[in-house]
Amino acid sequence: MGAQVLEFPSTRPTPATRPRLVLVPQPAPEPEPTYRLTRRGRLVVALLVAVMLSALVLAFAGQLASAAGPTRSVTVGGGQTLSEIAARELPQLPITAGIVELQLANNLSTSQVHAGQTLVIPDR
């Protein structure tokens, strides 16, 4: 038995039938614009930043001034309730609003108070 050589037809295209590649010119990318500030522009930006910072400082100082005012405090007596203290210390408010103000000023989650507890009275 002898070895047989099999020949397969070539699947490669011949140079005459091969399609030619055509280069398509690409548009040149546009350069990104560069922005430059003039002296006047830098001055305007600096002034805007200064104005914003000073407004922020003034607002913060106003908050500190209102928060740092004199505070009154009351010590809860035996048998006193938060509604009694609200009626006595905040007479300009309805009792329910006074209770809420006292709870907010003293970080209370309930209306329960005990004798000897010191409560801050909010300024109204």
Image (spheres, rainbow, N blue to C red):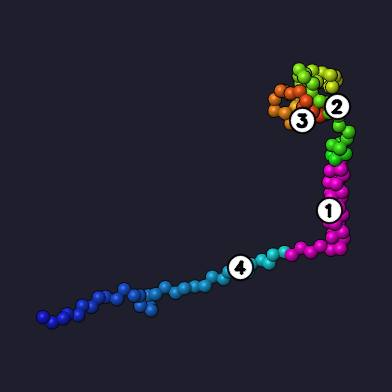
| Residue 60 image position (x, y, % from top left) | 84, 43
As drawn, the label of residue 49 is: 1
In the picture, the quarter occupied by the C terminus is top right
Residue under the point 81% across and 62% down: 37
Q: Residue at x 57, y 71 (%)?
A: 25
- Give whichever of discs 4 and 3 has the lower sequence position: 4
The quarter holding residue 9 reads bottom left
Look at the numbered disc 1 and give the secondary structure of its residue.
helix
* Label 2 sits on residue: 124
Task: Please say if the residues under marks 2 and 1 sit with CB atoms less than 8 Å apart.
Answer: no
Is 9 in front, or is 5? 5
Q: Position of residue 109 (x, y in %)?
A: 70, 28
Location of the N terminus by quadrant is bottom left
Residue named by callout 3: 106
Identity of the amino acid at label 4?
A: Pro
Q: Residue at x 86, y 32 (%)?
A: 71
Residue type at mark 1: give it. Val
Distance in Å between CA atoms under marks 3 and 1: 38 Å
Please rate how many residues cluster around mark 4, counting C-alpha atoms within 10 Å: few if below 14, some from 14 to 19, many from 20: few
- Give the residue pinned by disc 4: 27
Q: CA distance from mark 2 to mark 3?
A: 15 Å
Q: Residues within 10 Å of mark 1 (few under 14, many from 20)?
A: few
Q: Is residue 19 above or below residue 113?
A: below
- Residue 17 at x, y = what percent? 37, 75
